[in-house]
Image (cartoon, rainbow, N blue to C red):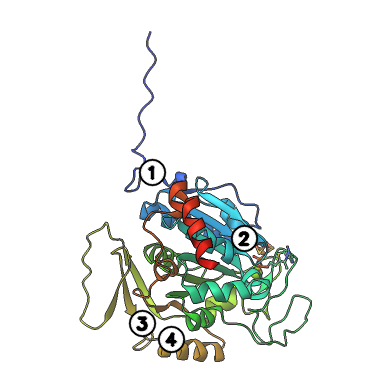
Amino acid sequence: MTANPTPAGPPKKVNRIGLEMSAYRGGKTTLCAGCGHNAISERIVEAFYEMGVESTRVIKLSGIGCSSKSPAYFLGASHGFNSVHGRMPSVATGAMLANKDLLAIGVSGDGDTGAIGIGQYVHLMRRNVPVIYIVENNGGYGLTKGQLSPTADLGTTLKNGVVNDLPAIDLCALAMELGASFVARSFSGDKKQVASLVKAAIAHRGTSMLDIISPCVTFNDHEGSTKSYSYVKDHDEPLEELSFVPFFEDISVDYEPGAVQEVLLHDGSKLFLKKLAGDYDPTNKAMARKVLHESASRGEFATGLIYVEPARPDFLTLLNVVDEPLATLPEERVRPPKAALEAIMRGLM
Ligand SMILES: Cc1ncc(C[n+]2csc(CCOP(=O)(O)OP(=O)(O)O)c2C)c(N)n1
Ligand code: SF4
Ligand SMILES: [Mg+2]
């Protein structure tokens, strides 16, 4: 007697390179249930799946912190380097110099970036190194039990009542001022906005700095904190409604002339920005500066695409690096022959 064949289930959904979403997942999270960082990892998984990126082309980088543990929870088949506290930018710069064909995504925390790593951060932004740089910003040091970080707003309190008497560093304003070519702010609870921004960051060539407010449910989700879920939900001021159209999809978007701004990204993908805040234009740095300062002074978060400059040359272009990745060049092309070295030495005598 022959056994009944198992009925075939519905066909599995795959992306444009034939992979299921599960191919983009990583290990099981060890972060607290409800931590904003977990929601961001989910959006990264979805974005890389939807863009059909080859995992082996991606390098994930991080420093130290709960946020910096996140790369273990997405893109399990990609390259990875969990570096020292605050040192992710120099490792990312080195990796991209060695292999310009990589797609680098760095995840850091507000402590990792804004405190010990600030010196490295400013140079990565200034160089416009082609890296997606995500700060999972909870206004505190989650991993070491909730101390105030440099992005904690003036006057916010710790759970035990200690008041923060220092002003916050605005990582978006800093990135934009220094030369990053794609600067955005979002909230881990805004699935649609985070997803569109991560996909747009994949399509951009240059530094994409995403400052994502990501509440720490264990140490910084109380009244008195401006990085709690309830505070951020009540004070989120989206600048635009974002629609991302990847280069491999031919979708025409219908809109009233003037109502939507189109941003063409490096790989041919497009972002359509339906303005929600007056005539906001993210290609205008002076306007972006003003909006960031004004919203911060009202205790609000301006979210969305804050600044974009798609044509700004990235660091590797400025360095005029050869087309082939340096890491793949054969020895005879990277090591001058003995005769060439001897000729240089003779010239110095
Ligand atoms: C050189 C060094 N100094 C200090 C520490 C202790 N330390 C570990 S994580 C951390 C801060 C983490 O905060 P953040 O980057 O905001 O990440 P979060 O845990 O909040 O996601 C600190 C100070 C360390 N690991 N190494
Ligand atoms: S301590 Fe805070 S930042 Fe760390 S995993 Fe828990 S909720 Fe997230
Ligand atoms: Mg933090």
Q: Residue flagged by tag 1: what amino acid is it?
A: Leu
Marks 2,3: beta carbons within 8 A: no
Q: Earlier in the sequence, mark 4 or mark 2?
A: 2
Q: Residues within 10 Å of mark 2 (few under 14, many from 20)?
A: many
**Residue found at x 59% / y 51%:** 72
What residue is pinned by disc 3?
A: 283
What residue is pinned by disc 1?
A: 19
What is the C-alpha distance between the residues marked 1 and 4?
38 Å
Marks 1,2: beta carbons within 8 A: no
Q: Residue flagged by tag 4: what amino acid is it?
A: Ala
- Give residue 68's mark: 2
Q: Say which element carries label 3.
A: loop
What is the C-alpha distance between the residues marked 4 and 2?
28 Å
Q: Is residue 238 visible?
A: yes
**Residue found at x 47% / y 64%:** 131
What is the C-alpha distance between the residues marked 3 and 1?
35 Å
Q: Earlier in the sequence, mark 2 or mark 3?
A: 2
Q: Residue flagged by tag 3: what amino acid is it?
A: Thr
Query: How far from the left and from the top, in percent, is residue 174?
Result: 54, 81
